[in-house]
Image: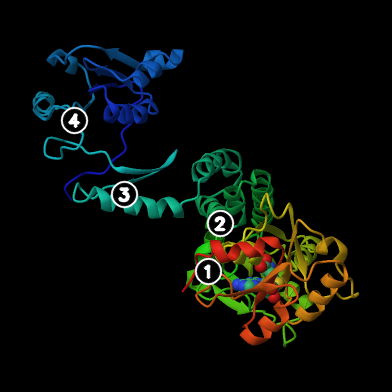
Amino acid sequence: MNYFPMFFDLSGQKVLVVGGGEVAFRKISLLMRTGALITVVAPEILAQLHKMAHANAAAQIQLNLQIRKFISDDLNQVRLVIVATADRDLNRSIAKLAEERAIPVNVVDDLKASRFIVPALIDRDPVLVAISTGGASPVLARRLRERLEALIPQRFGPLAVWLQELRKSSGERLPSTAVRRRFFETIIDGASASRFIEGDKQGARRIAQELLEATLASLGETTVHPTTVGSVMLVGAGPGDPELLTLKALRALQDADVIFYDRLVPAGILDLARRDASRVCVGKASGGPSTTQDSITALLIRHAQQGERVVRLKGGDPFIFGRGGEELEALAAAKINFSVVPGITAALGCAAYAGIPLTHRDHAQSVSFVTGHADRQGKEPDWRALAMPGTTAVFYMGLARLEHIVERLLAHGAPPSRAAGLISQGTTEQQRVITATLAGIGAAAALAQLESPGLLIVGDVVALYKSLKWFTR
Ligand code: SAH
């Protein structure tokens, strides 16, 4: 190991920065957050640094600007030196002086002259992930940083602060180290922390409280069984392209104990789940055999009650023709904790990948998402509104009832010449798009023999496809 990794408490410590340009500015910005007492020495100093030094009383104590050349006495009582002038020889001579006095020195972009180096940082203060390649490849360190950035939730810092508070308030009510550790593992691995990370602090606190009470209640029992609070995350998987998954959805998949997914969930997405998660298909081919809605909700409830982290994964967005609302109603009635992660719904995905803007100042002032299926009571959409000019109508589950939809729109005053498009297997490599007039779309569809799933878009915006299409295989 070339370097010893450590985190240095600099609060109230004298730090010298030689140099007053951009590079120095970046280092000083970071140093300011540590509470170090910083002296900057440079004949010329960036305006931003002047501003920073005059910003507030605290900054004025912390940041001392010396507009002059470096002298060796600047090193007196200094804990740490950062050298960042544009003059390499000067940098090295200052580094040498620091070395003679055994003061740790970093010369920016000069590994050889540096005693310590500053890592690439993933900043979730107070959680810090520092990356170093020992100077071998800063680009590699940056790439690694980018990957970890995406993986570590933004609210990881506040989560750590909350856990610290929780340790004070609840920790002392739990009698032994073993029980405490188990309690915090359950919080961090379970619904409570994921709630917090999603931004629902109250939900997180409530679940933690439930867990604390359950843990305290189980203390008297002779066999200690782990107390967990299960939860269900209703997650949208997007329309097809796995890259359209949200970061939250990805995290849910990586945290899940069990995943119940629909047939429509895009291929490749389940591969992103935690390897140990069990995957259960409860899907539904339109008209084909399927698990009934009641038995799906019963499954979700049972697994959550066993303390598992359940992911209910649906194609597109769970609240758009996904029965997400119905499933949540059942969970709410059973008092199961749940949360929802939206997904890119088929209308948005297909429209984007087909180059059909759903609204456009010249062509469409509104857009409707409509089911092509009549519901259980045979309720029909408001055909007159959908046939109006200046609107875009997107029909889900419309392939099988295409003729009926076209006939209804025409009967309610839509002109036969209005543009219409069908997108099948949108956003995937198999995507196909056909466009025609409303009157002609039926014949065009019959000719093209599109595979399901397919989406119908009716409106003047569809004509833009010819000039805006970009996703071609
Ligand atoms: N919750 C889903 C929709 C479920 S209904 C969502 O938000 O997207 C199923 C219908 O969605 C299909 O019949 C089809 O009309 C549409 N659909 C879903 N994925 C699609 C895709 N990749 N391409 C075209 N249509 C799609």
Q: Nearer the viewer, mark 4 or mark 3?
A: 3
**Label whose residue precedes the other's in the sequence (1 or 4):** 4
**Label whose residue precedes the other's in the sequence (4 or 3):** 4
**How far from the left and from the top, in percent, is residue 71?**
14, 14
Q: Nearer the viewer, mark 1 or mark 4?
A: 1
**How far from the left and from the top, in percent, is residue 120?**
31, 44
Amino acid at pointer 1: Asp
Count of number-bearing discs:
4
Nearest the eye: 236 or 86: 86
Residue corresponding to mark 1: 241
**How far from the left and from the top, in percent, is residue 225?**
61, 64
**Label whose residue precedes the other's in the sequence (2 or 3):** 3
Amino acid at pointer 2: Lys
Does dot 3 land on a helix, a strand or a loop? helix
Residue corresponding to mark 2: 248
Does dot 2 land on a helix, a strand or a loop? helix
